[in-house]
Image: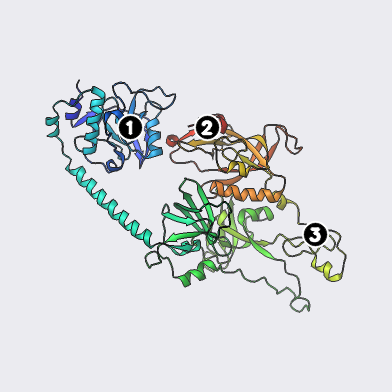
Amino acid sequence: KCVESYSLSITFKFTMAYSTTSSTTTATATDTGGQVYTRKTCPHVLQCVKIPVSLDVFPDLSTSTQCQTEKCEHTECWVCVCCHQILCGRYGAQHMIAHTNTHSHLIAMGCGDLSFWCYGCDDYLDHLSIQPIFDFYKIAHVSKFKHEIQNLELLLTRTHFDAQNKLQQQQQQSTSTTSKMDNEKMTQKEWFMGTELLRRRYAKQDAIEYDSDPEHKQTDNKAHTHTGRIIKVSKKALGGGGKLMVKDENGAYCNYDLHSIRVKLPPATADNTVVSEVENTSMVNVRPQPPPRSTTHANDDDDDAESAYDAPTEFVPFVRAKYRQKELRKNTMVEYYVDDDDSDYAVQKARIVSVDMKIQKVSLQRTDIDDDDGGTVVTHAMCDVHIRMPSLFWSCRVCSFSNARQSKTCMVCGMLGVEITVDSQRPTGANADAFPNYFFVYGTLRDDDDSGAGWTQYWTNGCSAYNGKVCGYKMYQRHGQNFPFAIQTGNVNDFFVGRLVTWNDRDTMRAKQKHADRIEGYPDFYHRTVVDVEVLQNSSDDTVNSAQHVKAFLYYQDTPDDMHVSCKEVPNGDWLQREKE
């Protein structure tokens, strides 16, 4: 049957069905076929349709109907109308769907029937109603049948492009106006300290230009001015300043201290400013201080009461506080403040109502508020709650006096003239063991990674590494990305393998942890936890042997919504056995 019969039809049947959300496309589980009504307009045509200049740069559809992906032999294929690649559809290996998700090329044409499908609209397009689609169809018809469309003049009388042309004119006018406004704003922008972001209105994914080394401390003779997208701006846990998380022009996630960078912003106005500069200084840059340590003691008549020693205290994140004080459980009285975007950092008194380590939440009943319920109960994420705790300090081995934090010289022995032959020591026990001695890495942080990531060699320099396996997790890779991510499944039969990495001293381990946090975009992009890792090989280190289990840091992600469309499981849970793109 001649293909012109398709051109003259208004409705037609296909045994193709898709379900999409935005530009992410998911093939439906069942495909019952049925009558399909084509769209008369499409907002994605202007950006996604590229008409080939000649048949010389367009694939020959009379013969080239096999997927162009390496090692793929499927022939039920589609042509991308933007880059003109031929890729298999949902009944093949779904390479066209992966291509759409990666490059946002939303419109494709079937090689068999020359029908047009828009992944963004989740519908077929009527080529008789959309001028660019019709022009593309004419080229494809010649490529497939080696002759022009018969009865073209009659076919043109059935076209009606007015609605689509009107839509494209509106899009072009809107784009022109937006571009003009953006250019005007760019010409007015000035350089500010990064902390200026704390008093500006912004939205996630807003474009930003920033200088990561305004004081030229790095000696690589390179410019450090970048452009990117804002992921998150947050206030610091203690003191002024804050943090900026951006996705830079290369797609990497980076974290910066606001006081150490400069950002290019338009002048402050009433429309783009959250609070006035005076209000902002008092609210953000100067954190409300906790109440001073009490010098009043039980025996007020004691002459030495005022001179009694009062141990220093500090505010510690709730998870770390639990390692220091094991009785930090239900009904424990605490002083705390909350560190989140809406907090005023006021110190409050409360009683612990419940602690849920599974979802990392803690419920507190305020005791500094009098109401009919006996105190308001509030629930916070553990990472946002900071508990007042005694500071970690050093104790003298001679007189057992507790010195100020990290002071190795005993003040009492010094005043009494006692000869000090040994240094003070920090308390040992659960506090010293709370920080694992290993990282369990499985992707670009592996010492034997072959993906070419720029940070691998620097981060693993000087490390010792062993093979390991962790259960209850699976490893996946997103299409088009050259790094993996782990998700927690809770199934003991799920596992993946990687490398246990460690360094000889604790200071280096802490420095590597901070660097890894920046690489992984912790806590916004990846989460960090401590897991039990099985060692898979013997080593010269007496503390690490095969079949032994050790504690290690692990970075993982939440399960993405588009897992089954945009992600694939890494074969055998081993990053080195992945399919390299």
Vertically, is 104 above or below 225? above
Cα–Cα span, label 3 and label 2? 50 Å
Which class describes the residues within 10 Å of circle 2: few (<14), some (14-19), or many (20+)? Answer: many
Quarter of the rendering containing residue 375: bottom right
Residue at horizontal 18%, vertical 25%?
Answer: 5
| Residue to which mark 1 is pinned | 84
- Please name which of the two marks, 3 or 1, marks the residue nearer to the observer: 1
Check disc 1 and report its element: helix, strand or loop.
loop
Q: Position of residue 264 (x, y in %)?
A: 44, 60
Quadrant placement of the N terminus: top left
Q: Amino acid at mark 1?
A: His
Q: Earlier in the sequence, mark 3 or mark 2?
A: 3
How many discs appear?
3
Residue marked by disc 2: 570
In the image shown, does 389 or 244 lie closer to the viewer? 244
> As shown in the figure, which amino acid type bears the numbered disc 3?
Ser
Q: Which mark is residue 424?
A: 3
* Marks 2 and 1 in Cβ contact (< 8 Å): no
Question: Label 2 is placed on what type of residue?
Answer: Val
